Image (cartoon, coloured by chain):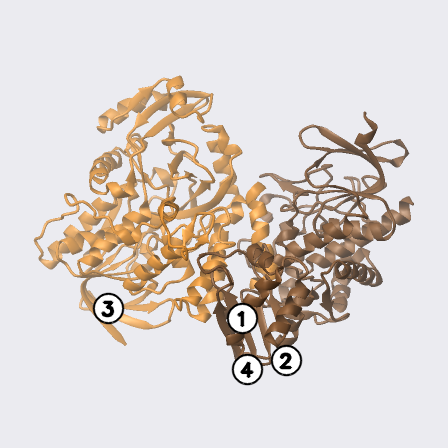
Chain colours: A orange, B brown
Amino acid sequence: MQVLNTQVLIIGGGATGTGIARDLALRGIQCILVEQDDINAGASGANHGLLHSGARYVSSDPDSAKECREEAVLLKRLAANCIEDIGGLFVAVEGDDENYVADFSHLCARCNIPVLPLGVNEARELEPTLSEKLIAAYLVEDASIDPFKLSMENISQAQDLGCQLLCYNKVIGFDKQHKRIRTTRLQNKLTGEKFIIEAEQVINATGAWAAKVAGLAGITIHILYSQGSLLITHSRLTERIVNRLRPSSNADILVPGGTVSILGTTSIRIDDPDDVYPTVEEVDSIVNEAAAMIPALETIRYIRAFAGVRPLVSSQSSGDDRSVSRGFALLDHSEEGLENFITISGGKLTTYRLMAEKTSDLISIRLGVSAPCLTRTEPLPESPSVQWSEPALAPKLWLKHHEPEDILLCECEMVPKSTVDAIMDSIRKQHGQPTLQAIGLRSRIGKGPCQGTFCGPRTTTYMYDKGELPLDRCLPGLREFLRKRWKGQHPILWDRQLIQAEILEAMHCGLFGLELGA
Amino acid sequence: MIDSDVITCDLTVIGAGMAGMAAAVFAADTGLSIVQIGGDSEIGFASGLFDLLGIYPVNDRRQWNDPWAGIESLIRDHSQHPYARLKTEDIQTAFQILLSFLGDGGLPYSRHLNRNVTIMTPMGTLKTTYCVPQTMWSGVEALDKKPSCLFLDIKGLKGFSARLLAARLHDNWPKLRTARISFPGTGAWGEVHPEHLANALIIKQNRKKLAKKILPHVKDARIVGLPAVLGLYQAQKVVAHLTELIGVPVFEIPTMPPSIPGLRLKEVFERGLREKRPHYFTKKRVLEISQRSGDMFEVNIGNQTKGRTILSKGVILATGRFIGGGLHADRRRIRETILDLPVHQPGSRNKWHREDFLDPRGHLVNQAGLEIDDAFRPLDKNGRPAFSSLFAAGSILAHQDWKRTKSGVGIAVATAFGAVKSFVHLCR
C-alpha cells in the first residue's frame, strides 16, 4: 500500500481547509489536503456567496458582527479578484418589527459597522424592484464573493508552495499509537484504491462532517446540522445585495452575481449531512417570504435550488439554529487524549481566513514553527486556471476571439471546448481525474437553463473522444451529473423549468434510456 | 363579422405535434373537412423513432419483444391508460394509414408487424422501438447480424462520437471500426450544424464529394453508418445514392435532438396535408372556444386580437403537455391552457417529481393530464364529457408515461385515430 508522508494533513477541501493549506504553506509548513469529493463540495459551495458587512449579526451576535466587519475589510483588499464590492441594503417592509428597525443603526454603531439611512423613495430609486410597502432602508458595505474561486485560489497558491491536493479521497480510518494519530487511512472514491498518510499533525476541517471524521478517531463532537436552501433566479434583479431588516428568518437575503441572483435561506434541522437536498416546501416558503421584499420574486423564473449544511458546534438543542453563535469552534483534542489532532468547524465564509489563521497558529506552536501568519498581509494571487466558474467570462473571451475549431459545448452559458480543455489540464496537474462532475464544478457547464440536458452528453462525448474519460465513466458519469443537477431542479419545476425538465427526460430517458441502466 | 373571416368545417384540430398531425391525416383520410391550428410544434425535437410499447412495467424495466403483448399486459393492469380505450386492430390500422401517408410523402418507415426492434442511440445505449425510418433499417439489421461495419462521425458535429458508440457496442461486435471525416466544404468551419449538412446533401454534387471522403475508410466494411443528417428530405434517395457511390449499404444512426428525422416528419406532414387541409394556421393561437346551439363549436383564433372564427362540428385537442403548451403549471397546480378542463394531477407539487431523476418508478407528474371517456372526450369535474364533441389525443392524456414506457408516437397516433373515429361515429 502506498504511504505518503507530510508534516500536516488537512482533511476537507472547503474554504477553511484550503485557507489553512495556504496559511501553512506560506509559513513554510509542508501539507497534504485530502477531500472526499471536490473543492467546495459542502457548505463552502452552497451558500449565498455573501461577504457580510457584519450588520446582520449586530443584534444576535455582536462578536461575530465585529469579526465579520474586520475580515470583510481585510478581504476586500487582499482577495479583491474574488469579490464584487456591490454594496448592500437592509430593508424593512410593512409588518416587520419596528423596534428592530429602530435599534438597527445604534447596534451597528456599537460594532463599528458603517450604515447609511436612506429614505424609502431613495432606496426604491436605487433598487426599483423593491416593494412599494418599504418602511425603512439602510445602505451597508456588503459585497458578493465567489466562494469557489476563493477556495481554488487558496489551494492553487498552496500547491505552488508545495502543498499536495488529493480530491475524491475519503478518510476511512485512523491508526492511533501513544496518544497520537500515527496514520490516516484513505480510499480513492473513483478507483477504490487504498493508501495511508503519515502526518505529524492532523486537522479536521470537514465542516458538517467534522463529527463523522472525529468519530473515526474515537472522538465525540456534538454537532447540529442545519440545512439551508437557496434559489437561483434566471436573471439579476438588483444591483446590490438586499437583506431583510428583521431578526434572522427565512429568505432574508438576495445576492446578485453576474446575470443571476441567489435567494435564501431556510433553516431546517437534519440528522445527516450526507442527506441534504432542497425541498418543495422550502422553495415555496422562500418565494412567499421574499416576495414581500421584492414582489418580482413571486413571478421570476428560477433555474435551480441548492442546499448546504451549517455545522453548529453546540450543546444547545432548542431554538432557532440561526440564533446559535456563528463563531467558529477550534477544538484541541489533547484533552480527549489525542495530541496531534484538532477540529475546526462552524464559522462563516466571511471569517474563513481568520479560522484558518487561528488553526494554523495552533499547528505552528505544536510544530515549533515561529513563522508568522502572512494571509493577513499578503494578497491572494489570482490563478489563471481557476477562473472558469465566473459567469460570463468564457463567453466574453470566446466572443472576443476564438479559433474556428473551438466550438461551444454548452450553448446556454457559452462554454467552448478550449475551456473544457483548460479545466481538464488543470485537474490533471492536480493529479485528479477529469469527470463531467468536476468539469461542471469548475465551469458554467450544466448551470444554465438547460441544466445539463444538452451540454451533458456533448461534453461527455467530447471528453471521451479526447481520451480524457474512460468508457466505463461515460454513462455512469452522465447519470451522476444529471442526478446531482436534478436534486436542485425538482423543487423548482413549474412553468418554464418544468418544460425544460420534460425535454430532459424525453431525451435522457425516452431516447437514451438512461434509467434502464447498463 | 365579415364572411371571409369565418371558416366552416367538420373538424378543428388544435395542435401540430405528432398527435395533431396524425389526427389531420386520419380525418383527411376519412374525407372530413378540417382546419388545423398549431404553431411551431415539438415535432422537430422528435428522434424520428416510432415507439409503440417498449418497457412495461417501468419499475421492473421489462422489455417487450412483442409490443402488442406488452400493450395487452399494460391495459390489463391499467384500465385508464389511453391504450385501454382502443382495440388492437384500431392501433394497427392507425399505423398502416400513417405509414402509407409518410411513404407516399417520400419518408418510408420500416418495421416488423408484430415485433419490436433494437436500435443504437447517440449515447451508445440500445433502445427498444417499433418502427424506424427506412434509412436506419440496415443499422437495425446490422446490430443483429454484426457484420464488418464502419461508423463515421463528422468533424465539428457535436454530441455524436462514433468512437463512443462503437466502444459501447464493441464487446459484442468486434468487427466494428470508426473514423472521423470532415464534411466537404466545411474545412474552415469549426462547428457544423445538422441542418446545413442535411441541406447540402440534397445536392448530388455534394453527395459525390462526401462519398470521396468516405471511400478510403471503407476497406473491408460491409456496411457504413453515419449520423442521421443524410438529406433534409428524400433521405432514402440520398442514402441510395451514397450506397451506390460507396458500394456498400449506408445507414443513418439517430442523433441528439433537435434531429433531422424530426424535421423530415414535419416537412412531410405539412406537404402531404397541404391539399387535403387548406386551412392550416401556424402563427395563430386559439383565443376562445365555445359551443353554440346546435352543437357547433365556435373557435376564435388570432394573435392579440381576434382574427378568424372557425365553425365546426367537432374539435380535437392535441395540444401536448408542457413542451407543447397544452398543459401549464404554476407553483400550485397544473392547468389545461385552452378550456381550463379539469386536469388529473398529484395533490401537491412535492409529489410531482421523485428526488431521483432516474427513479425507476417514473415521476408522477407524467401521469397527469386530461381524463377521457371511451370516446376520447375530456371529462368535466363531474366525470361527464365536458362537451359532446370535444375530443383529446396525444400526450395531454392522463394515466400514461410515454417517456418511460417508450410509447410516445404509439400513444399519439393511436389516440388520434381513436378520437377521429369517435368523432365520425358520434357526429356524422
Specify the amino acid type for callout 3.
Answer: Ile
The answer to whether tags 3 and 2 share a subunit is no
The answer to whether tags 2 and 1 share a subunit is yes
Instruction: Name the residue that disc number 1 marks.
Output: B212
Q: Is residue A167 above or below residue B19?
A: below
* Callout 1: SS: helix
The Cα–Cα distance between marks 2 and 1, rounded to whole angstroms, is 27 Å
The Cα–Cα distance between marks 1 and 4, rounded to whole angstroms, is 16 Å
The x and y percentages for residue A422 are 33, 57
Specify the amino acid type for callout 1.
Answer: Lys
Quadrant of the image occupied by residue B280: top right
Within 10 Å of disc 4 (Cα), the crowding (few <14, some 14-19, many 20+) is few
Disc 2, disc 1: CB below 8 Å?
no
Disc 3, disc 4: CB below 8 Å?
no
> Is A448 left, or right, of A503 in this rendering?
left
Specify the amino acid type for callout 4.
Answer: Asp
Disc 3, disc 1: CB below 8 Å?
no
Chain at tag 2: B
Instruction: Name the residue that disc number 3 marks.
Output: A197
Chain at tag 1: B
Instruction: Name the residue that disc number 4 marks.
Output: B220
